[in-house]
Amino acid sequence: MRFPVAIELGTDTTAFGIVVPDLPGCFSAGDTLDEAMMAAEEAAAAWIDSALDAGDAVPAPSSLETIRQHADFEGWTFGVITLDPALLDDAVERVNITLPRRVLKRLDALARAAGESRSGYIAHLTLEEPRRVA
């Protein structure tokens, strides 16, 4: 899924700024254009994740031309970020995993202490864990 972005060019003393107009309040910055674009992808993914958690709809991406013609972005540069469409998939899927018994006991104890089911606890940990890039 591709979202258009508006890019405010940086200088020697200011960062590049990026706005994702289709996702209200979603923006990022970076010292380089590459850093700003990567940060915009992360910000958009976090925006979508939060919207889905809140039960809100995710807007469909506008065309790049529509964003380019928006008066608020006169003089800006434009581009697109690409997000994995799986971000929008909240369908429940049953999985079978294999864990050592001692790990499973620890997992169940942690889930109970958190007041969650085993599956809920695993999902919670996965969604709350900071995203790591290899």
Image (cartoon, rainbow, N blue to C red):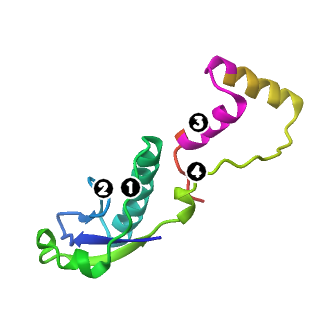
Looking at the image, tell me whether mark 2 or mark 4 is earlier in sequence order. Answer: 2
Reading the image, the residue beneath label 3 is 124
**Three-letter code, disc 1:** Ala
Which residue is found at the position 78% from the left and 47% from the top?
95
In the displayed structure, does residue 22 sit left or right of residue 91?
Answer: left
Q: Nearer the viewer, residue 22 or 42?
A: 22
Q: Which residue is mark 4?
A: 90
Q: Which comes before the other along the chain, label 3 or label 1?
A: 1
Label 2: state its secondary structure.
loop
Mark 4 or 1: in front is: 4
Answer few, some or many: residues within 10 Å of disc 2's Cα (few below 14, many 20 plus, some between 14 and 19): some
Q: Nearer the viewer, mark 3 or mark 4?
A: 4
Q: Which residues are magenta?
A: 112-127
- Please tell me in which quadrant of the rendered image residue 121 appears: top right
Is residue 11 positioned above or below 115 on the image? below
Q: Amino acid at mark 3?
A: His
Where 89 falls versus 50 (above or below)? below
- Is residue 6 toward the left or the right of residue 57 in the image? left
The residue depicted at 37 percent of the width and 75 percent of the height is: 80
Q: CA distance from mark 2 to mark 4?
A: 21 Å
Q: Which residue is mark 1?
A: 43
